[in-house]
């Protein structure tokens, strides 16, 4: 075999190893989001992206400092780094579960911040190993940068998609092992083509693979936060798990207790004296408890469902055609059965949950999940409503989140498109004349949830052409839940009389109906000033904007551009919370947002401590010349790229949740397309490098494409909401591919410039880019929450343009780079 052919085969083997390692590390990143959603809560997602990038940034620093030694031992260090990832990926997660971190205590317990920092650093270790291997390959073979970087991005893109399929087949804790083995497997061609392979390293690979296959079961088990609902339920004597199964959008556990029976009826009237039927508890991601209720065919056994706030609309109008969004385990379906509703459309996102209920719980539920009058639809709520051509007498949304997590503000970072102004507009447009939209939610004190929902309904009514929203709204509350009714028509005196009769019999408070007086509210479940009645009156007045601005919590309506319905935190409340330190006051704290701020601070601290400070301290060893204009401009160039790439990536992940229906699907689809397209762009980037100022081609391509999407995305979203999920996934990939293609070019173009100017700076550039990337994920989330996705994308465009100016300045002051 010729030396050329041998070199080509070895290059292919190296590219294969890089691609499989990159696929495993990106899949591990997505998997960690799922794992932390199970053992903790959703708001760790963007911190995980940040900790992954910390590992990448630190690896660049180590490569920059030890480049000579590492490159000379490439044949040993590269496989050792791959093996390090394979062993540390599951190992660090297993250790992380032993850290007694509780996000609910982060403001009140001083030791929680160092525990969070320790968790952050520990989980960055596997990404450090993966990035070190990839970065070392880039530095060892600078003439093949575009090809290796393309393999890196393409592998990462495929990994983000493959992990979704993997989660359909095996539980997430087992998927950890599979990803580690895949990374180690990538080394086999690398070794097989080596004429003198390192036998000890080869033995280490086989030993590591064997150890992963035979790891004890107890090591792999998930240690769920004791503050989640499932561990709390298991503390009750006699409770046992009878079923469990997993999918990419939920880990389901079903429990039963014959000694102390479950009695789950959220918001049940304090006046109720009915006995509940036997129930089983179902938990999704160890939280979000709902009940599977035994039904013997006798509607009288369901009378307790008439003693909840969600029963109100059935007393005002008996619907012929009811739409239930988020049918879950069937509580709303049983309520419809009690009121003898003839036609019910039930929408459920989790197909595996519905299959389970039909196969394993249908007999227990009296055939509820195969009833002839119920038409089941698998899909996302807004997508179904938007695609439906039928009007409904009533649309019902009830308690789609956990009480404990909601009350603690742990959903603050969750993008939720179910309660935005645009969502409510869509529901109202699908109501028949005199129909009702009924939304039941948990009660929080001080009041905020229902006030934000009320403000959102007012905005939706005005946007649909109703200048009299005050005549179309009803708001009631019990001790635990409250229900908002929005009518497709004016609330008449007869309906008001029926409302009063319903609430008086059940000791529910009326917070608003057209024409009510202050004396009629706050009679049973009393709250201090300001009462919800005063708040909703202010929200209906011309001074509503001023009232929302001065309120203790953020109750501005959520929109599709800022879909953070559960974000209530306001910085103006922080002094009051701080003054209550050690005295309680947890009800004022939105801990999800506090975790985000803590995560952002620790990301900056970790990035500065482990990347920024060493880069500055050892600048001489790195060849960095602080007074050199080229050095500073290239620093700015890679720093801007690190911020801008993640800004756009995160903006599109969050935007596409709307029609891809779940954050995991959105992360997988967007990352897959962005990274594969960026890999293609990286591979073709040398073409742009042939031209003077060629770096402007991809940057202008990014700017034009992103601006075009900003102008068209609202129209595209309205269209895509009508389409099936598989179609939306394909369109999402087609939309992100051009943007990803252009975004894959600036980084290798910059590395090429550095290679010509000073090759020793390649790892340094990797570190600067990594430092910016570490802080960009949390910063992007903060920008999106406060100013919206559109502003986030515009900021990214500005950063790309600034990066282009920096590289142009390098070219002007270093003519030799243009040769």
Image (spheres, helix red, strand yellow):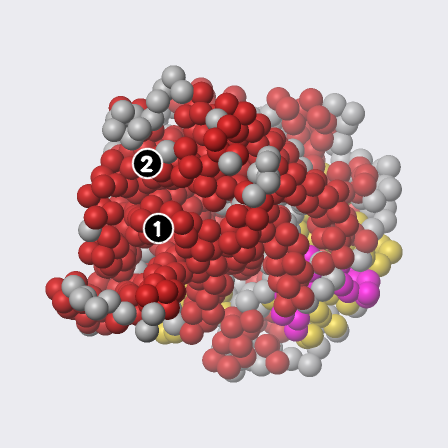
Depth check, front residue: 264 or 731: 731
Residue under numbered circle 1: 141
Q: Which stretch is magenta?
A: 376-394
Spot the residue most to the left: 200
Above or below for 52 versus 720: above
> Badge 1: how crowded within 10 Å, few (<14), some, or many (20+)?
few
| Residue under the image location 68 percent in, 75 percent down | 374
Depth check, front residue: 757 or 657: 757
Left or right of 505 on screen, residue 186: left
Left or right of 772 on screen, residue 90: left
Left or right of 182 on screen, residue 498: right
- Asked if residue 297 can be seen in this view, the reply is no
Left or right of 293 on screen, residue 192: left
Above or below for 583 versus 119: above
| Residue under the image location 27 percent in, 57 percent down | 82
Q: Earlier in the sequence, mark 2 or mark 1?
A: 1
Residue under numbered circle 2: 760
Residue 556: % across, % down: 65, 33
Residue 26: % across, % down: 41, 56
Residue 126: % across, % down: 29, 51
Residue 540: % across, % down: 76, 31
* Residue 729 drawn in magenta: no
| Residue under the image location 65 percent in, 38 percent down | 700
Secondary structure at badge 2 equals: helix
């Amino acid at each position: 075999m010729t030396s050329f052919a041998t070199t080509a085969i070895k290059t292919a083997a190296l590219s294969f190893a890089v691609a499989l390692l990159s696929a495993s590390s990106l899949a591990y990143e997505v998997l960690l989001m799922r794992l932390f959603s199970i053992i903790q809560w959703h708001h760790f997602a963007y911190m995980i992206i940040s900790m992954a990038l910390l590992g990448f940034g630190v690896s660049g620093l180590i490569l920059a400092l030890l480049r000579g030694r590492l490159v000379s031992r490439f044949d040993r260090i590269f496989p050792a780094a791959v093996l390090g990832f394979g062993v540390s990926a599951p190992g660090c997660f297993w250790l992380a579960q032993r850290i007694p971190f509780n996000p609910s205590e982060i403001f009140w317990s001083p030791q929680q911040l160092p525990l969070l920092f320790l968790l952050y650093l520990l989980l960055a270790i596997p990404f450090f190993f993966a990035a070190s291997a990839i970065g070392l390959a880039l530095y060892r073979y600078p003439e093949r940068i575009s090809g290796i970087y393309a393999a890196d991005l393409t592998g990462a893109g495929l990994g983000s998609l493959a992990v979704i399929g993997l989660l359909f087949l095996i539980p997430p804790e087992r998927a950890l092992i599979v990803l580690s083995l895949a990374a180690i497997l990538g080394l086999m061609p690398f070794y097989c083509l080596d004429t003198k392979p390192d036998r000890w390293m080869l033995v280490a690979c086989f030993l590591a693979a064997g150890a992963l296959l035979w790891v004890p079961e107890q090591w792999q088990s998930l240690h769920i936060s004791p503050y989640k609902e499932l561990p709390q339920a298991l503390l009750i004597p006699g409770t046992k798990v009878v079923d469990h199964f997993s999918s990419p959008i939920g880990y389901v556990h079903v429990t039963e207790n014959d000694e102390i029976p479950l009695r789950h009826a959220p918001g049940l009237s304090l006046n109720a004296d009915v006995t509940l039927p036997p129930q089983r508890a179902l938990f999704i991601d160890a939280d979000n408890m709902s009940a599977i209720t035994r039904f013997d065919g006798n509607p009288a056994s369901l009378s307790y469902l008439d003693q909840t706030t969600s029963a109100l609309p059935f007393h005002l109008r008996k619907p012929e055609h009811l739409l239930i969004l988020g049918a879950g385990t069937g509580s709303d379906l049983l309520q419809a059965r009690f009121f003898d509703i003839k036609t019910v459309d039930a929408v459920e996102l989790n197909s595996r949950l519905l299959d389970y209920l039909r196969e394993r719980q249908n007999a227990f539920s009296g055939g509820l999940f195969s009833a002839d009058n119920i038409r089941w639809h698998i899909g996302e709520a807004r997508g179904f409503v938007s695609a439906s051509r039928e009007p409904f007498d009533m649309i019902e949304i009830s308690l789609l989140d956990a009480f404990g997590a909601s009350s603690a503000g742990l959903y603050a970072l969750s993008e939720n498109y179910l309660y935005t102004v645009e969502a409510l507009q869509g529901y109202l447009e699908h109501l028949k004349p005199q129909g009702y939209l009924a939304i039941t939610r948990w009660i929080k004190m001080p009041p905020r949830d229902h006030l934000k929902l009320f403000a959102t309904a007012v905005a939706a009514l005005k946007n649909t052409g109703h200048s009299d929203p005050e005549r179309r709204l009803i708001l009631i509350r019990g001790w635990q839940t409250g229900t908002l009714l929005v009518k497709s028509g004016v609330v008449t005196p007869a309906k008001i009389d029926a409302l009063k009769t319903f609430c008086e019999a059940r000791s529910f408070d009326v917070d608003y109906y057209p024409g009510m007086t202050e004396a009629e509210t706050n009679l049973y479940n009393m709250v201090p000033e300001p009462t919800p009645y005063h708040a909703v009156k202010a929200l209906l007045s011309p001074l509503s904007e001023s009232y929302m601005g001065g309120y203790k919590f953020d109750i501005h309506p959520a929109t599709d551009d800022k879909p953070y319905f559960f974000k209530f935190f306001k910085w103006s409340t922080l002094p009051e919370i701080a003054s209550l330190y050690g005295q309680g006051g947890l009800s004022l704290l939105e801990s999800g947002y506090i975790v985000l701020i803590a995560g952002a601070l620790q990301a900056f601290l970790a990035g500065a401590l482990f990347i920024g400070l060493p880069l500055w301290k050892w600048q001489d060893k790195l060849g960095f010349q602080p007074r050199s204009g080229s050095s500073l401009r290239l620093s700015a160039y890679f720093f801007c790229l690190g911020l801008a790439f993640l800004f756009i990536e995160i903006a599109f992940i969050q935007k596409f949740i709307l029609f891809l229906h779940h954050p995991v699907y959105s992360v997988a689809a967007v990352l897959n397309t962005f990274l594969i397209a960026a890999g293609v762009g990286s591979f073709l980037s040398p073409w742009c490098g042939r031209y003077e100022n060629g770096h402007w081609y991809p940057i202008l391509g990014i700017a034009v494409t992103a601006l075009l999407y900003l102008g068209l995305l609202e129209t595209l979203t309205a269209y895509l909401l009508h389409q099936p999920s598989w179609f939306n996934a394909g369109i999402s990939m087609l939309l992100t591919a051009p943007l990803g293609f252009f975004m894959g070019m600036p980084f290798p173009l910059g590395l090429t410039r550095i290679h010509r100017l000073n090759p020793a700076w390649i790892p340094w550039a990797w570190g600067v880019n990594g430092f910016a990337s570490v802080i960009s994920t949390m910063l992007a989330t903060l920008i999106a929450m406060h100013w919206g996705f559109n502003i986030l994308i515009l900021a990214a465009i500005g950063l790309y343009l600034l990066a282009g100016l920096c590289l142009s300045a390098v070219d002007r002051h270093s003519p030799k780079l243009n040769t």
